[in-house]
Each structure stands twice: as structure tokens, then as C-alpha cells.
Amino acid sequence: MKLRRKYLLASLASICATAFIGGVTNSAPPMWAGGENVMNVELKIGLRSRKYISGFPVPVRATFINKGHRPFCFPGHIAPALLFSKILVLEAATRTAAEPVRAGGARELWNYDAIRDAAPPGHSAQFWEPVYVNRAADVTMPGKYLTRLEDGKIKSNWLPFRVIAPPSRVPGGVPLVYSPSAKGLRWIASDKSVQICVRQETAAGGAHLPLVTVFFRNTARGIIHLRLSGDPFFDFMPRMGGPDGANGDELVKHPHPHWVPIVNKTAVPLTVFGHWLAKQKTPRSLEWRPYSLKPRAVYEYAVPINLGCRFDLSLPGVYRVRVRLAHSKVRSPWAKITVP
């Protein structure tokens, strides 16, 4: 009886130990992003909208669907450029690759965590930051595009989207709006009777936009008349440099196989749309009309200047911008804008 009882207790202890150890050590290790055995992981991407204004960000959301029997996860410090080996962007009409940008697909690293967004078997996990297509390819020229993310054997679906031209003509045909409440503007000291300055626009939530608004001020004692077309692409000539700030002391990888330093005086290259715009002649249909500026009055140009469609702002940081009034020597002081 004692032997039978001793044998029974030993058997129960063995079963409990096996169950406990099996629950800890026999569980399948997770599948890591970019590692092996990821054939059971599906990658899907989506967009909030299928239409974007040229020069604005194009964020893509990536979702991993785990169809295997092991958890799928990736380290929290990994960046989209390291997680996705390829961010493909094609022009839909010709199926040719879009032109590269200055960032070359590089992005800032995210916060360090042990494990982020693990996907248990049969579940999905969304990558916690959007992948900005405009930081991998030039999508400023209006038209249709296709994009896809790849990580080795993991390939997402092709996703179409459309880029439309930025608004250029002033609605109503009146480019200048009296703005007596404009505050915090920085003017440049000059002997010109007309002064201009720029200010970056922000969204409702405070996010910085690649837009600047131009303000006019009459410093003379009498009324001054200006001739404007109502089209910011032909009324102003912007210049940009940078970025500095977060990227000022770093080496930024170009699409070409070399490394170059970026400083705040580095001229920002033009985009595909910017090169196209530089070759355009002033349309004959534009009507250059005179507008009156009252003494000591401040006026706001009705349509902001879209810098993102003209200049390669794929690198985040702080840029410098200066605007010159077309067909004149009147120019604004250098102003800083932030690109997140």
C-alpha cells in the first residue's frame, strides 16, 4: 500500500512538472520581423485617403496578420526603413519607379522598447507608426501612383493613390486681404516702401504644414500700388536651406552611394514638380492687376505658398525660407519652418 501510494505521488508530481515546464519552455518562440519562418505572416497596407495634395505627407499604415502557430513581433526600437527593406513607389501610368528623394527612405528611430505590438497566432498587429511614402520617393508630380512595402519574403498588397496639384489661383480673384490682427511677424529693415514676411501655417491640432503665408506692409506715408497675378507660383520666388536642428550634426544618407553633411545653409533641391514649375513660362492668361496698400497697413496673401511641392522636404528638421516678390527686389527676412 505504501509503495503504491508513493508511486502515485511521484506520478502526479511528474505530470505537474511536465505541464509547468511545457507551459514555459515548450511554447514556440516568436517569429521576429525580418527573420526566418515568416511565410505564415501576411502584410496589408492602407491609406486614410486615396487623394493627396502635392507636397503633403502620404502616410501608409502597415498591418501584420499572423496566420501561423507562433507569436509574431518585432523590437520596439526598429525604424520603418530598417523593418521594410523596400518601399516601392511606381507611377501607375508607366509602371516605372518614382524618383528618389534626399532622405532615401531613411527615418528617425522610434522609442526603445523591449517588444512592441506582438501578434498572437490568428491575430493582427498594426505597426505603431505610419510609413511615409513621400520620404522614400518623389510623389509631388500630380498623377496616379502605386506603392508596396516589402521585407524579404513578406510583401504587402499594391495600394493605389492619387496626387493632385496644389491650389494656385486665388478664390474670388482678390489676392490681398486686409489683416490688422496679424501679430508676431518679423519684418526686415529696408529702404523699400513695401515689406513682406512669411509665417508657417499649422493644422487645427497644431501640426506643422509645408505651407507659408506671405504678409505685406506699407511703410510709406501714402498709398502704394502693387501688381499681382493672384497665382503664388508666379507672384513669389522662394528659396530654402537646411535642415538644421535635429539633423544639423548628423550624416544623412543620399540616394547616391555616398554620405554628405547637411547644414542650415545647404540649398534644398527641387522636386520633380519643382523642376517642372521652374521651366514654365508665365501664362498669358494671367492678369496682373494693381492693388492698393494703405499706409502702415498689413495685408495677407490669400493663398499660402506650398513649399512641399517645390522643394525636397523629405528630411525632418528645421529649414530656412526666404521669399522674393516676383519682378522686384522686395524680399522677406529668413524665417524658420519645421518639418516633422
Image (tube, rainbow, N blue to C red):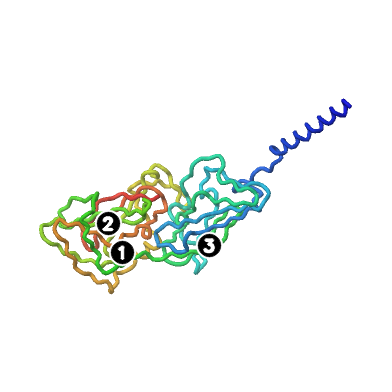
Q: Identify the mark nearer the N-term, 3 or 2.
A: 3
Q: Secondary structure at mark 2?
A: strand
Instruction: Point out the frontmost of discs 3 and 2.
Output: 3
Q: Badge 3 is on which residue?
A: 159
For the residue carrying disc 1, how many other residues have a C-alpha within 10 Å: few (<14), some (14-19), or many (20+)?
Answer: some
Gap in angstroms between the C-alphas marked 2 and 1: 11 Å
Left or right side of 177 for 83: right
Q: Is residue 212 above or below residue 263?
A: below
Which residue type carries mark 3? Answer: Leu
Gap in angstroms between the C-alphas marked 3 and 1: 31 Å
- Residue sitting at x 43%, y 64%: 163
Q: Badge 2 is on which residue?
A: 323
Q: Badge 1 is on which residue?
A: 233
Q: Nearer the viewer, residue 116 or 102?
A: 116
Q: Identify the mark nearer the N-term, 2 or 1.
A: 1
- Residue sitting at x 37%, y 56%: 269
Looking at this view, name the residue that lies furthest to the bottom.
285
Q: Position of residue 258 (x, y in %)?
A: 46, 49
Q: Is residue 70 above or below residue 157?
A: above
